[in-house]
């Protein structure tokens, strides 16, 4: 508490009381039976930068449905930003062999993906006619130009260097993508954790040119198969594998929902950025981040149980 005179003046009889707390002018009022406090320091709006956030929707047309399109994609970009943050936190935990901490972060990332999947349903309320009222105003602007999405693909393990070309006029984005391209991905760090955990991971997968696309390995598939065949003996690595698999599972579901939403809104037209639209998005469904975690499942076999089935008592 301080005797410093507050800088603001309240009208006589105001229901608001004030004081100086920790050097900050602080206010208090009873509202709807609750004692509510606030101050001139950190406010909700300053913390979340709501003025900047809510002034960032700048339509290029006078068509009312464009606002939905803008906000939908802006929220996607915010969620992708959070995913980038969380995946990097998971990588830090993996490097420290804190597999439980990494798993918790991967669970959160997968939950974000599930939220993003459902968000396509909001955009799907945009009818073909609604979209066509402002599509022409978008010119060549398209989701293909999302550098955050490309960064997320690189970070998870899908390295496709030629896709940086579309960002050549954005120096900051280009440098960021080149940096992520040169660093180990989430999957590279997972394989390194497996190696430290005693799994036989080829040296060529632990030390390589990180900018090159990952090539599946029979030895890596064998390592995952051994873990999944006896999960009780390899519980931490097994649960890590399942959490990583879940992340790709939901990512692919997001891609599928994206493709179906585009198909519903524009059919098989080319994208505004020149891609083949739905056909391009369909091809993306065949892209994997963690290939051996999927391929080894085909090799798993169920143990024979129940004795001699030729003598089965069930008729």
Image: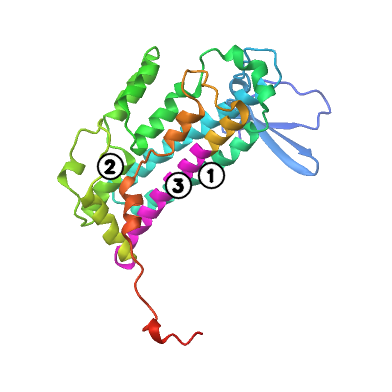
User: Could you tell me which secondary element the residue under label 1 belongs to?
Assistant: helix
Q: Which mark is residue 114?
A: 1
Q: Assess disc 2: are there few (<14), some (14-19) or many (≥20) residues with their C-alpha within 10 Å of its C-alpha.
A: many
Say which label, 3 or 1, has the lower sequence index: 1
Cα separation, mark 1 vs mark 2, equals: 24 Å
Residue located beneath label 2 in the image: 188
* In the image, residue 255 lies in the stretch drawn in magenta: yes
Of residue 166 and residue 234, the one placed in the foreground of this image is 166
Relative depth, front residue between 272 and 192? 272
Horizontal and vertical percent for residue 200?
A: 19, 54
| Residue 116 in the image: above or below residue 233 | above
- Viewed as shown, does residue 299 lie left or right of 21? left
Please tell me whether mark 2 sits on a helix, a strand or a loop.
helix
Query: Chief secondary structure of the magenta span?
Result: helix
- Residue farthest right in this picture: 13
Pair 3/2: label in front:
3
Q: Earlier in the sequence, mark 3 or mark 2?
A: 2
**Magenta range:** 232-256
Q: Is 225 displayed left or right of 169 in the figure?
A: left
Q: Residue 249 shows which numbered tag?
A: 3
On the image, the x and y values in percent for residue 79 come to 51, 34
Precedes in sequence: disc 1 or disc 2: 1
Q: Nearer the viewer, mark 3 or mark 1?
A: 3
Q: Nearer the viewer, residue 100 or 309?
A: 309
- Label 3 secondary element: helix
Give the answer, above or below, for where 103 lies relative to 274: below
């Amino acid at each position: 508490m301080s005797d410093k005179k507050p800088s603001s003046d309240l009208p006589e009889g105001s229901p608001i009381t004030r004081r100086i707390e920790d050097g900050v002018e602080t206010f208090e009022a009873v509202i709807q039976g609750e004692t509510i406090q606030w101050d001139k320091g950190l406010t909700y709006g300053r913390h979340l930068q709501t003025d900047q956030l809510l002034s960032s929707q700048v339509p290029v047309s006078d068509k009312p449905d464009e606002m939905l399109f803008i906000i939908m994609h802006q929220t996607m970009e915010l969620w992708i930003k959070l995913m980038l943050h969380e995946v990097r936190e998971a990588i830090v935990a993996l490097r420290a062999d804190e597999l439980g901490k990494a798993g918790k972060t991967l669970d959160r990332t997968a939950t974000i993906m599930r939220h993003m999947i459902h968000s396509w349903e909001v955009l799907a309320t945009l009818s073909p006619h609604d979209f066509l009222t402002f599509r022409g105003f978008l010119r060549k602007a398209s989701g293909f130009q999302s550098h955050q999405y490309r960064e997320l693909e690189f970070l998870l393990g899908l390295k496709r260097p030629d896709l940086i070309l579309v960002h050549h006029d954005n120096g900051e984005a280009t440098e960021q993508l080149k940096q992520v391209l040169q660093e180990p991905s989430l999957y590279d760090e997972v394989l390194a954790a497996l190696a430290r955990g005693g799994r036989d991971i080829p040296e060529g997968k632990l030390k390589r040119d990180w900018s090159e696309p990952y090539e599946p390995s029979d030895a890596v598939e064998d390592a995952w198969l051994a873990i999944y065949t006896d999960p009780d003996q390899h519980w931490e690595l097994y649960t890590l594998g399942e959490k990583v698999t879940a992340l790709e599972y939901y990512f692919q579901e997001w891609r599928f929902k994206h493709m179906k939403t585009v198909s519903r809104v524009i059919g098989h037209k080319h994208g505004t950025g020149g891609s083949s639209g739905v056909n391009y998005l369909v091809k993306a469904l065949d892209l994997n981040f963690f290939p051996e975690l999927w391929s080894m499942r085909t090799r798993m076999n169920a143990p024979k149980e129940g004795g001699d089935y030729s003598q089965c008592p069930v008729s």
